[in-house]
Every structure is written in structure tokens, then in C-alpha cells.
Image (tube, rainbow, N blue to C red):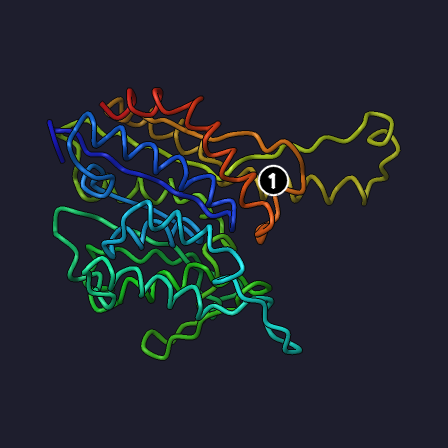
Amino acid sequence: MTNNIFRCLVIPGGGMKGRITVEFLYNLEKRIQEEYGCSLYQFFDMISATSTGGIIGGSMYLGIAIPRIRALYDLGKKVFVRSYLPWTPKYKRKPILDQIIHEAVNAGSNPNRTFGEINKHKYLMISSVNKCYRPARNVHFKSWKAKWSNLKIIEAIQYTFSAAYYFGASNSDRYRAVYGDGGEGNQNCPLSEAINSINRLGFRSGQVRVLKVGVGEYEETIPYRKAKRYGTIREAMPVVMMAQEQAPKSQVYRARAEEWDDKYKFCDVDINLPNKKLTALDGIKYIPEYASLGRKMTEKCLDMAMESMA
């Protein structure tokens, strides 16, 4: 917390589209280093992240530099290894975790660092869901909570990217829980819980700055003539899905927080995806396009993000 300003970085889920996010963060860190003389990790007091965002945020707290996190995504098929066994998830989780551990060791950091070992002036929150409940319940691993003090950061990373189809759920004997991907709940963008946590932690005396860096958005439309022909049942399903998608939208929580407290200042950084194919969660072959979109997002939003955090 510098100059009486508490800064929070929110990173939502989005699979390989995290390459867009990490490209922006790479350029953001360079500007922060120029203007503030510190790293991205040092600049933000809190990181709240889910799924692919949990990989990025958790890796930072393992001492891995942003350029190396970016390189992790660029490895593509070398770490996102297909599993061809019947009735198993599409990808193997272990190669990704092994690479993160390898990067932490190379950075001179302890790959088994726990939440309880995080600096008391830094706050990490990684979100998942507990599938022992029906429907599954959101779970937020918080570094400042005693309950999670023995949880390894690498374990939290594993629990947050556990999409059933892609990697499979993660079982925890210690917590007697079956953890699923954080994006499977309504906290794929964990902004609301970040706001709640900031309030509960008591950071009310100064200003609060919240930066949400997205993974790209795609707005799909239906031609008018086709929409007119939709029957009642067929029409109802998209409405249900639309409600599910829009309920956790960051704009909702941003508006609420600004209404509650004028100390909050938000910046929502994102970019429109030019076509639907880029929405794929496992779009490994689109890594160059994601990197390019990250650079475009930098050109469009970097100055705005820096101004909002001042």
C-alpha cells in the first residue's frame, strides 16, 4: 500500500485466452517499472484470480517473473499435452504444474510456498468451486485466512484450473473436497469477492484502485429474421444462458462498489475478439492471434490503466 492507495488486480478465467491477459500485464509491468521502479507483484497489494488467471496470479506469488509466465503460454503443446486414454479429460494437468514448479525453482523461489508464508502486507485470492455440494459452491482460497495457511500456492493453482472436460476435477483428502475450475461457478470474474474482501480487511482510510484485465470478449448476434422464427422453448434457452453469463459481469459489481463508496476507482481493460473461433478455451493454435490481441489491448488501454492506478 503506497501513498495511502490500496491496489487490487483482478484476473478472470478464459483458458488459453490468458495469453491476451499476460501480454498486457507484461507491458503494464514495464511501465510500472519505469514510473514506480517496482515489479507488478510489488505494485499491487492484492491479486484476485480464477482459472487461467489463477495460473498467472499464483505464479507471480511463486516468484516467477511476468516474461516467464508469458513464455509458459507460448510453450503451447509442450505443456498442454493431450491425453488419448478413453474416459479421461482432454489434457494432462501434470506437465503444466511441473513447468510452473520448474520456473519457480529457476527463479530461486520455493515451489512449495504456502499461503501462510506470503508477506502479511500482500493478499492473494484464488477461486475454485467445491463439487461436494449441489450445486457446486464457490471457494476462495485467501492468503490472509488461517484456514488456508498450509495450502501450497501450487495446489491452489491446480484447484482453480480443473475444468471437468479439459483437466478433470481435483480431489483433496486434506480438505475433503472435490475442486472444480473456478470458472464453473459464478466467480469466473472474481471482482465481487475482491471488493467484499477489501471492505472486510478494513482498507477504508485511503483510496482503493481496482484493475480488471480481461481475456477478450465476443458478442454474438442472431439475424433478425432468424430471431423472429424462434419458438418459445428455443427462445427460452438463450435467455437462461444469457442470464448466467451476465450475472457475474464485472460491470455489475463495479457499479455497486462505486455506489457504496466513492473511495473506489475502477478500470476494466478488455478487447473484442474478432471471431467466434478465438473464444475456444483450449485454442493452442491461436496463441499468435492471442499475443497480437494482447498487444492491441496494450495500445488501446495501457495509458488508461496507468492513470486509473495513480
Q: Position of residue 164 (x, y in %)?
A: 56, 65
Identify which amino acid the numbered label 1 is placed on: Ala
Residue under label 1, please give it: 243
Q: Position of residue 170 (x, y in %)?
A: 45, 71
* Residue nearer the viewer, 258 or 38: 38
Horizontal side, residue 147 vs residue 268: left or right: left
The residue at 18%/60% (across/down) is 108
Q: Name the quarter where the C terminus is drawn.
A: top left
The residue at 35%/20% (across/down) is 304
- Is 90 located above or below residue 49 in the figure? below
- Is 100 located above or below residue 14 in the figure? below
| Figure quadrant of residue 72 | bottom left
Horizontal side, residue 165 vs residue 66: left or right: right
The residue at 65%/44% (across/down) is 241
The residue at 19%/26% (across/down) is 207
Q: Position of residue 66 (x, y in %)?
A: 31, 45
Q: Name the quarter where the N terminus is drawn.
A: top left
How many residues crowd mark 1 within 10 Å: few (<14), some (14–19), many (20+)? few
* Label 1 element class: helix
Horizontal side, residue 49 vs residue 235: left or right: left
Q: Position of residue 216 (x, y in %)?
A: 52, 36
- Count how many numbered circles sit on residues in the image: 1
